[in-house]
Every structure is written in C-alpha cells, then in structure tokens.
Image: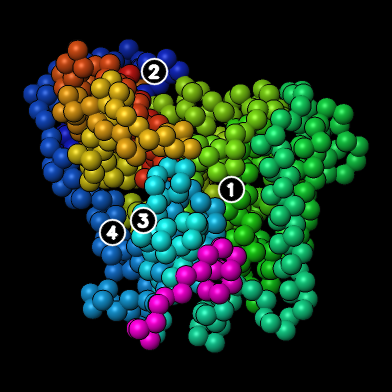
Amino acid sequence: MKISFLAFLLSSQVSKYSSSAFSFSFSPQLQSAIRTATYTSTSLAMSSSSWSDLQSHSSSSVIGSALNEQVALRKEGRGSAHVQSNIRLFDSKEYNVEKNEMPRITLYRDHAGWCPYCQKTMLLIEEKRIPINIELVPMRSYGDKPADFTRMVQGGMLPAIKVENEKSNQPPQVITESGVIMELLDRWHGKDEGYKPMLPENMDNVGWDKYNSLAKLERELFSWWCTLIFRPEGPRMSAGGIMGMLSGATGGKKSKEMSGAMSGFLDCLGKVDKELTSTPGPWFFSSKDYDYPTMIDFVYVSHVERMLASAAYWKGLNLRSEEMKSKFPGINAWLDAFEKRECYLAFKSDYYTHIKDIPPQYGPGYDGGFEEDRQAFSKSITGMDGTSWVLPLPFDDAVQPLYRGPPLPLAVLESAGITPDADGSGMYEQADPSIMERACRQMAGWKLSGNGEKVATFAARGGSKGANNPRKPFGAELADPYAAADKSIVPYVDAALRVVAEGLLDDGTFAVESEDGDADTHMAFLNTLEPKLQAAVPKEATDDVLASLAYVRDRVGVPRDLPLAAGRQLRAHLNWAIRAL
C-alpha cells in the first residue's frame, strides 16, 4: 500500500461517510491507511485554520474564483441569475450602478425564495432580461415586514413593483398582484424594443383564447392539488398498485382504491399533459415564433414545482419517476426543459425547503396516497433515510433528480471543466461523479467559509441557553428570526464549523491507494480531521454543539443558501461532524 499526503489542509472537495448508523465502513486495508495517515498528520490536523485562511484558500480555487467573479458581476447588475440579487441590468447600456443610473422600476419579492408568485415574476424578468431594481422583503410566515414597506404597499402583499415617475415631483406608482405585474412588465418591454413577447399579440384572438383556457386549467389543477394535499384524503391506497391505478385514472376504469382527490388530481394532470404534447416543443406555446417559455409557462411552473414536492412527501407520488415520464411525457419534458435553463435553477427550491415552506402558506398537508412510497420518500426528503444526507452521498438523488440540467451555476461548472452530456440533451447525468461532487462540495465550502462567523453565531441559537431565549413565533416551523445565540458555546461551534469548512474545501490532494486500486481519498482526509474536531469541543459543551450543528443543518435553504447539489453536501458534512463528535 502506498500513501501520499500532500497539503491536505484547506483543500477543496467534500466528504462521504457511510451507513444509516452514521458509521464508516472501510476495508481493513483502507482503515490501516487512514490510521497511518492520521498519525503522520497529527501536527497539521491539530492546527487551527481561521475563517480568513479558509476564505482565502477557497477564493484561490477555480470554483471560488468563479463564484467571486459572479458576486462582483451581480453588484453591477450582471452575471447569472441569483435569488439574492438586488439589481438586474443584463447587457443594458442605459443604466450604470457606479453612476447611480438605475431603472425606474423596483420589484419587491420575498427574501428566502419561498413565494411562488414572486418566483414566476422573477422568471419572466429573467427570460425577458428586463432591467430592474430588487428589494428583498420577508414573508409573514418567517419574519416581520419593514414598516416602510407596509406603509407603501397596502396589506404588505408580495410581489409588488414601484414605478418612479419620470417627473420627480410626482409620487411613484405601486402595483401588486403577480399576474398584473407580469402583464405590465411584458407590455412595457415590447418586441419592438428587442424584448421577447410573453403574451399573444393584442389581435391574436386564437392565441388569447388558448391562453385564457390554459389559465383556467391552471386554476383547476391548483384546486385539485389543494384538495389532495390539504384535506384528509381517506383510506390509504395499496402498495404496488400505483401503475394500475394511474392507468385507470388517465383513461379506463377507475380503481376502487383510489381516492376521489387523487383521481381528480391525476386526471387534471392528464389534461395539462395533453396541452403540452399538442405543441411541437416543450412549452405551452411552442412554435417557430415561441421557442422559449412564455408567461403561461411561468404561471404553471411555480406551483407545479410545489406539487412535485408535496405529492412525494405527503402522498408517495413521485411525478418525476421513469414510470411517470411514460404517463405524463409532456409535463416531464416541460420540466426537463425548465431545468436546463440556468435562471430556473437560481429560483428552484428542493423538496425539503418546500415541505417546510408550504404549510405556513397553504395549511398543513395530510398523509395519504401510496403509504409505502410515502414513508420512503418522506424519509429521503428530510434526510432520515440514512442515505440522502449521509456521506458518502449517492451521485444523484432518487426522488429529485439533480442532473437533468445544470446543477450549479454555469460559471462554476465551466470553471471545473464540467460540460453537458455529449448526446446534446443538455443534461449532466454522464458527468464524472468525482469532479461533479468536488465542484458541489467546493461551492458549499466557499459559502460557509465566506460567512463563517455569522453562521456560527446563527447555529449557536440551537444551544441550551439559546433555546431558552424568548421567541416571537411565526408560521414557518423553523423560522426563528429573533432568537439569540447561546454565547457560551459560540467559540466551540465556530471551531467545529471551521473543521467542517476544511472538509468541504478538500481539493483531493490527500491520496490513499491500496493494492487492489480501491481508494476513498476524501473519506480518508475527513478521518484526519476528526481529532481536530473532537479537540475543538470540550466534553461539557458537546451536547450543545451537536444541537447547534443540527440547528443549522435543518435550516439550509434551497435556493436561498445554495442550489440543492451543493446544499446536500453541506447538510451531509454537518452530519459527518455530528457523527464524529
């Protein structure tokens, strides 16, 4: 066996540990290699890296450099779409941030990326490339809205836009309702000015009849979704009978075991699927004039995204499975087409975030549907299956596919040399798993190292003294904006998170090779960090630090904090630290 140990501190990859019991399962040969490597690296492993050191190291990597460049571009209103952007100028020459030459329109949208109506508005803005200012405002479910916003917008509704009057002595105009906002933005930025049209032309009666029919169908689908998810469904359905039931629900005899709510929802999905398969492309208005998504696509997708998460979690219905692709090919091709668009990734949540943000907005979901699958999917979504939030992570996610489009911003993928699959599909399912995982881990490490002190203080709210602080309750289960940190454990939480960041920033230069060629270099590297992690937390503080790491793990939001491909790495590495402690 040969062991090479090169500058493993502050590298840039993320980790893998195994089994539902959070225990390693290495071969005896690899265990021996790890013990040797640990002994060799004791002096390095026990030294402490500051957040500044970690951030500097991350910034020197190709991933960190690409991400830093995107941050700089976003400040100018350019670069790729991002859920935390405050201004979007795209390639407009009319405006300039440095000269304070700003657009007249300001969009107010939610801070966390939870609001479906804000999401569809942002997707239209990104597709049309409309220059606009953006102000981020909390939703009532997770925070208090600023007083100046509630004075300006009656009822504090989101989204809203403010349009400055060209005559400076006139008050600005404030407009609410996403449908109205989207239609006005489309009208104000017309085809004659070089913008993509999002609605049929005024005299296109056939187009408008189709649009209105589709809008009515979207409300019907929304109604069936609410009936299925937010009301008691009745008896559970038998396991293994889903495909027979589905075939009955889309033409043929209805299964006696299928609830009326499930049948109605699936029938309505069938109607939507029929509309999508009736066009030559993936979109509702696909044609030679519309080879891109239009307003009606955005109206649908923000709620369909939430339907995918809630149907899997509360009903055991995976609408993105291979079986469902055959039943609803139009819907799945439409979702695939969305997921190939980088701007959609910027505002797309994962299922975990959705099952936490849906109840405070729509009401509690009721368990039902296909019970065996429901239990499996719900455990996977919440990280309770011993796999989905545990290292080593599988390359893809069985419930929510990661690689049907770019899983990370294109600038990050390109910096890592990751290109779309050679078949021209625009997917990344054939990417080298180790290179892809490294890029995802490095992005998570970049985010943590750049915000380390703030994250440590935030996480310490989970300590026993933090948990005793008075709270103002909000509708969202995990919302805790007024909690104070347990100050007595902040230094220990900070030290633990710095070790987690080191793990995330492993660049793969720590190598372990065995005679049979097997190697898991990242797991071996993480093992060398365990003594440092354990030394950083005194025994009497261990329980509070564990609670703090779990506190922040459960509050990793997608897309607010990271895209899912990177967010799952952060969650899994926090679980690695919890296991190691």
Mark 1 vs 2: CB contact within 8 A: no
Instruction: Please determine whether, in this image, residue 244 is positioned above or below residue 536.
Output: below
Label 2, secondary structure: give it. Answer: loop
Label 1, secondary structure: give it. Answer: helix
Q: Which of the marked residues, 4 or 2, is nearer the chain's N terminus?
A: 2
Q: Nearer the viewer, residue 432 or 397?
A: 397
User: Residue at left 73%, top 74%?
Assistant: 208
Rendered image: mark on residue 305: 1
- In the picture, which quadrant includes the N terminus? top left
- In the picture, which quadrant includes the C terminus? top left
Label 3, secondary structure: give it. Answer: helix
Q: Amino acid at mark 3?
A: Ala
Q: Amino acid at mark 4?
A: Val
Mark 3 vs 1: CB contact within 8 A: no
Q: Decide: few, some or many residues near mark 2? Use Cα within 10 Å; few <14, some 14-19, many ≥20.
A: some
Q: Which of the marked residues, 1 or 2, is nearer the chain's N terminus?
A: 2
Residue carrying label 2: 22
Q: Amino acid at mark 2?
A: Phe
Q: CA distance from mark 3 to mark 1?
A: 32 Å
User: Residue at left 23%, top 27%?
Assistant: 486
Rendered image: mark on residue 71: 4
Q: CA distance from mark 1 to mark 2?
A: 31 Å
Looking at the rendering, the stretch of residues picked out in magenta corresponds to 167-185
Instruction: Please determine whether, in this image, residue 360 is positioned above or below residue 527.
Output: below
Q: CA distance from mark 4 to mark 2?
A: 36 Å
